[in-house]
Image: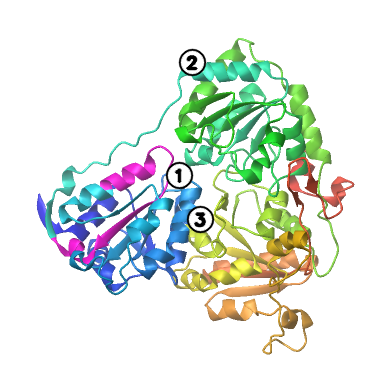
Amino acid sequence: MAKMTAAQAAVLVMEKEGVTQAFGVPGAAINPLYSALRKQGSIAHILARHVEGASHMAEGYTRAVAGNIGVCIGTSGPAGTDMITGLYSAWADSIPILCITGQAPRARLYKEDFQAVDIESISKPVTKWSVTVREPGQVPQVFQQAFHLMRSGRPGPVLIDLPFDVQMAQIEFDIDTYQPLEPYKPAATRAQIEKAIGMLNAAERPLIVAGGGIINADAADLLVRFAEATGVPVIPTLMGWGVLPDDHPLMAGMCGLQTSHRYGNATMLASDFVLGIGNRWANRHTGSVDVYTKGRTFVHVDIEPTQIGRVFTPDFGIVSDAKAALKLFVEVAEEMKAKGKLPDRSEWAGQCRDRKKTMLRKTNFEDVPMKPQRVYQCMNNNFSHDTCYVSTIGLSQIAAAQFLHVYNPRHWINCGQAGPLGWTIPAALGVRAADPGRKIVALSGDYDFQFMIEELAVGAQFKLPYIHIVVNNSYLGLIRQAQRGFEMDYCVQLGFENVNASEDSGVERSYGVDHLKVVEGLGCKAIRVYKQEEMTPAIKHAEQLMAQFQVPVVIEVMLERVTNIAMGTEIDAINEFEPLAESLADAPTATAVSMLD
């Protein structure tokens, strides 16, 4: 046993639980914890420019590498409330992050002390657990329980609120005998898996819907083995994108109202059986339950018991961690395949591939200013298969899901349910902090980019280089498109006559904010592109600048002001606003080309 402050004990526990990186903003009420971090020296810290940014950095850090848990730190008043958006985003997508806030001394609680707020109550709806620690001796075990909860069952965030005097108090604690608690993860039985495979075998046109739970469980390799053993095509959800490569013969495309492929929706509508693993039947994926489920039988596997039947009641439900279930799915399927007891799915899989060859959207536009579809074509042509994309929400993200290609798990980093503007920059910095060697390309519309643009200074200060593509139409594009139903275009224009813009370019002047100047003022590098011929040289130049200066490099692409991206109210009623591809030459994507072989 050793005597130490409760704050020191908290840092030692985090160290034992595998934490090596934190993000945050120091403040008076959390300074004891920062003092302990400095003295121990085992956990690196990145100073955010906004505390919400710190929470999104923690998210990116967790999402990037299996087993990571991002940590964000601030005071409990405005810093804690700033981090609520990050907690919501993490909670919505089952991402474990630990938020630590510094609180007023216990004697001052509920007395309207300066920057004191009941952050425990505020954060409870968007955390797995939120607690204000009122006894110093409880601090080590509260942190132990936090990590246990974040890793058990459906992952998610935890907030620990530490009053100033609790942090400062001396306690007895033996870190040498400390042991992390074993996480609880429900596991399917063989009988359940055999029944599910029996139902799959009875179907003529089965699909696997692969959700983000597979990526959370680090089970993408098992998903690929199971699909290949059975020959069943796979529809990944937006959060599951990357579980198998986009050019895999069994990758059947994504289904949904917005972030979907024409061939993915068509294949879903043609199916008669769906095995969902680690997914939650999100409304952007399904549209109405009636259309999505009509004529199909469903098996649902999820780690959260209350998720089964939440959106609609499946024909058979299995409560299980995705990895535990997939181990048995692979075991049973490979045994049956060896005995010749699995149906031949080659005809059905071939039909899915045929749709993937022909049901394409046009990208090969020559227009200047550029159409966004051509930007994604250029990105596909210039970025390698090991590129990790980071994006949040808006037409830029929706179009990215329709046109980009992802080939590895955790190479599409996206907040799927919450979708807060401003998420992209700090999340990309968190991904970079988690994996210094990864090729990272972030993607934003101009409004998302402006929301937390100050975090670029963090990338400059802490040498966190990545490429950021900003598609600039000077509009709140998704909201403008949604306002079509109200016959208005109201308060969504971002353009204005910038009096500081250069006289020789009407584009910069009328588009308002000069992002290049802002980016450079924050210590980063920036390039502006007007037409498709400039994209490849700009990307090569960005890679050179990134390597030379070790800072984020922004490529701003000036788009035409109004482009409607395909979407609809049902998966069988998608409005294709732009012309469709008449041939592969109209949509020269990596996936389309690979299907010719």
The crowd level at tag 3 (other Cα within 10 Å; few <14, some 14-19, many 20+) is: few
Tell me how far mark 2 sits from mark 1, CA to CA.
29 Å
Start-end of magenta stretch: 144-169
The amino acid type found where label 1 is placed reads Ala
Tell me how far mark 1 sits from mark 3, CA to CA.
16 Å
Q: Does any portion of residue 373 appear in the rendered image?
A: yes
| Residue 446 pos. (x, y %) | 65, 69
The crowd level at tag 2 (other Cα within 10 Å; few <14, some 14-19, many 20+) is: few
Q: Which residue is at a point 15% across and 52% down the rendered structure image?
A: 137
Looking at the image, is mark 2 or mark 3 earlier in the sequence? 2
Residue occupied by mark 1: 66
The amino acid type found where label 2 is placed reads Ala
Residue 437, which numbered label?
Answer: 3
| Residue 454 pos. (x, y %) | 51, 74
Residue occupied by mark 2: 191
Q: Which residue is at a point 22% across and 66% down the rendered structure image?
A: 164
Camera-nearest label, 1 or 3: 1
| Residue 410 pos. (x, y %) | 54, 47
Looking at the image, is mark 2 or mark 1 earlier in the sequence? 1
Q: Quadrant of residue 504?
A: bottom right
